[in-house]
C-alpha cells in the first residue's frame, strides 16, 4: 500500500523547512504566569542539524514540544514545509482585549480578523496530514515506550494511525526499520522491558522514522544512556540523517555532543534566545556571557588542563546593565546572532576583530 504523499508548499527548496516566529509558551503556576518560552524565532534549513542548548529549565524541551504541537503555542507562529501548523491564540486574544480597552477599536478589529484568518489557515493546513512529516525522539526510552505493546506494535502504530491496514506492508516496514537502526527482525515480537537502554532508544528512533519524516526533534536522546552507548546512538542518527535526508533539531545540554553533531547551535537562557551561530564559530568566538559560562563547564580528558580550568559564572545582574538600553536580537557578524543592547553590540563587534 502506497504511503500518503504530502507535497511541499515552500516556494523554493532554498526556503527554510521550519520557521518559528515570536513563539511563546506560558504556563499558569499557582496563579502566576510562567514564561517557559518567550519570543523565540529561528529557521531550520532542510538537511541541517540545529542544536539547542542550555541548562535544565531553560525551555529547550518546551520549544520542541510546542513546535510538534504536544503543546499549543501561547503566542507566535510556526510554519513547516510551507504549511502554517501553529498560531498563538491566547496571546492574540490578549492583544485584542488590550486594544479594545485602550479604545483602539480599529486595531482590535484588524487583530480579530488576522486571528480568524490564522486559525482557519492552520486548521486547513493540518488537515493535509503534514504533521506526519515531523516526528520526535524522547529523552527517556523507558517512559516513551508502552510496556504492554510489542516492538512490532510500537513501530507500526504510526502506520496504523495513518490508516494503513495492509499487514504484509506493515511487517515489511517494521523489519526494514529494525534493520536500519541496528536491531534484528526477531526483536519485533519482544517487549520493551527485554531490551537495554540503548536498544530501547533505537526502538524509539525506529518508531520516529517509520513514517519517513522530513524533520526529527530529538529531545536529549542520549542523556539517559551510558557514554559508550551515547556515541553509538549519535552515530546512528548521523547515518540516518545522511541516508534519509533528515533535518534534525537536536536538544541537549552536553555541548561536546552538540558540537560534534550540529551545523548551528542556539543557546537559550530562561526561555529566551541569547546566541545563535555556526557550531565552529560559537566555540571559537562565544560572545554572550552565558555562552562563555556554558563552554567553561565542558570537561576535557586532560588532567593538566582540568587543573587550570576556570569556571565562568554567569550573573545577569552583574554582566548586563539593561536599566535604560534594552537588549534585542542582533546580527553581530554574518550568521552570528546575539541578544544584546547597543553598548554590548559595539563591544562584541570589537571582540570579533581582535
Image (tube, rainbow, N blue to C red):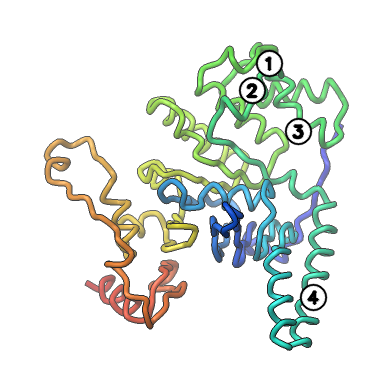
Viewer-nearest of labels 3 and 2?
A: 3
Alpha-carbon distance for marks 4 and 2?
Answer: 49 Å
> Which residue is identified by label 4?
112
> Which residue is identified by label 1?
188
Task: Give SS at disc 1.
Answer: helix
Task: Give SS at disc 4.
Answer: helix
- Name the N-terminal-most of marks 1 and 4: 4
Q: Quadrant of the C terminus?
A: bottom left
Alpha-carbon distance for marks 1 and 4?
Answer: 51 Å
Residue 265 x/y as whole percent:
44, 55
Alpha-carbon distance for marks 1 and 3?
Answer: 15 Å
Residue 94 x/y as whole percent:
69, 71
In the image, residue 266 sits, relative to residue 193, either above or below, namely: below
> Which residue is identified by label 2?
178
- Name the N-terminal-most of marks 3 and 4: 4
Viewer-nearest of labels 3 and 4?
A: 4
Q: Residue at x 39, y 42 (%)?
A: 254
- Name the N-terminal-most of marks 3 and 2: 3
Residue 17 x/y as whole percent:
64, 57
Amino acid at each position: 500500500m502506497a504511503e500518503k504523499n504530502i507535497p511541499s508548499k515552500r516556494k523554493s527548496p532554498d526556503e527554510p523547512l521550519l520557521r518559528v516566529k515570536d513563539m511563546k509558551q506560558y504556563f499558569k503556576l499557582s496563579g502566576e504566569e510562567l514564561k517557559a518560552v518567550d519570543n523565540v524565532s529561528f529557521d531550520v534549513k532542510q538537511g541541517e542539524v540545529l542544536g539547542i542548548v542550555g541548562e535544565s529549565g531553560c525551555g529547550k524541551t518546551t520549544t520542541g514540544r510546542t513546535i510538534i504541537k504536544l503543546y499549543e503555542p501561547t503566542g507566535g507562529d510556526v510554519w513547516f514545509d510551507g504549511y502554517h501548523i501553529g498560531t498563538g491564540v491566547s496571546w492574540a486574544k490578549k492583544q485584542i482585549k488590550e486594544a479594545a480597552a485602550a479604545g483602539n477599536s480599529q486595531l482590535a478589529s484588524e487583530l480579530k480578523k488576522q486571528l480568524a484568518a490564522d486559525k482557519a489557515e492552520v486548521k486547513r493546513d493540518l488537515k493535509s496530514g503534514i504533521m506526519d512529516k515531523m516526528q520526535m525522539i524522547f529523552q527517556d526510552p523507558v517512559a516513551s515506550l508502552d510496556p504492554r505493546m510489542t516492538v512490532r506494535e510500537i513501530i507500526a502504530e504510526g502506520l496504523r494511525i495513518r490508516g494503513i491496514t495492509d499487514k504484509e506492508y506493515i511487517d515489511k516496514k517494521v523489519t526494514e526499520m529494525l534493520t536500519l537502526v541496528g536491531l534484528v527482525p526477531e526483536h519485533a515480537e519482544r517487549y520493551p522491558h527485554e531490551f537495554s537502554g540503548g536498544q530501547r532508544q533505537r526502538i524509539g528512533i525506529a518508531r520516529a522514522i517509520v513514517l519517513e519524516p522530513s524533520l526529527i526533534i530529538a529531545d536529549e536522546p542520549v542523556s539517559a544512556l551510558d557514554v559508550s552507548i551515547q556515541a553509538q546512538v549519535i552515530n546512528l542518527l548521523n547515518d540516518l540523517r545522511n541516508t534519509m535526508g533528515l533535518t534534525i533539531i537536536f536538544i541537549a545540554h552536553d555541548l561536546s555532543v552538540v558540537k560534534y553533531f550540529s551545523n548551528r547551535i542556539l543557546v537559550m537562557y530562561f526561555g529566551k534566545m541569547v546566541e545563535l551561530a555556526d557550531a565552529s564559530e560559537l566555540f571559537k568566538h562565544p560572545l554572550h556571557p552565558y555562552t562563555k559560562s556554558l563552554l567553561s563547564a565542558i570537561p576535557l580528558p586532560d588532567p593538566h588542563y582540568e587543573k587550570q580550568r576556570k569556571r565562568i559564572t554567569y550573573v545577569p545582574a552583574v554582566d548586563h546593565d539593561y536599566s535604560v538600553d534594552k537588549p534585542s536580537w542582533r546580527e553581530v557578524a554574518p550568521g552570528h546572532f546575539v541578544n544584546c543592547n547597543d553598548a554590548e553590540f559595539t563591544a562584541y563587534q570589537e571582540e570579533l576583530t581582535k
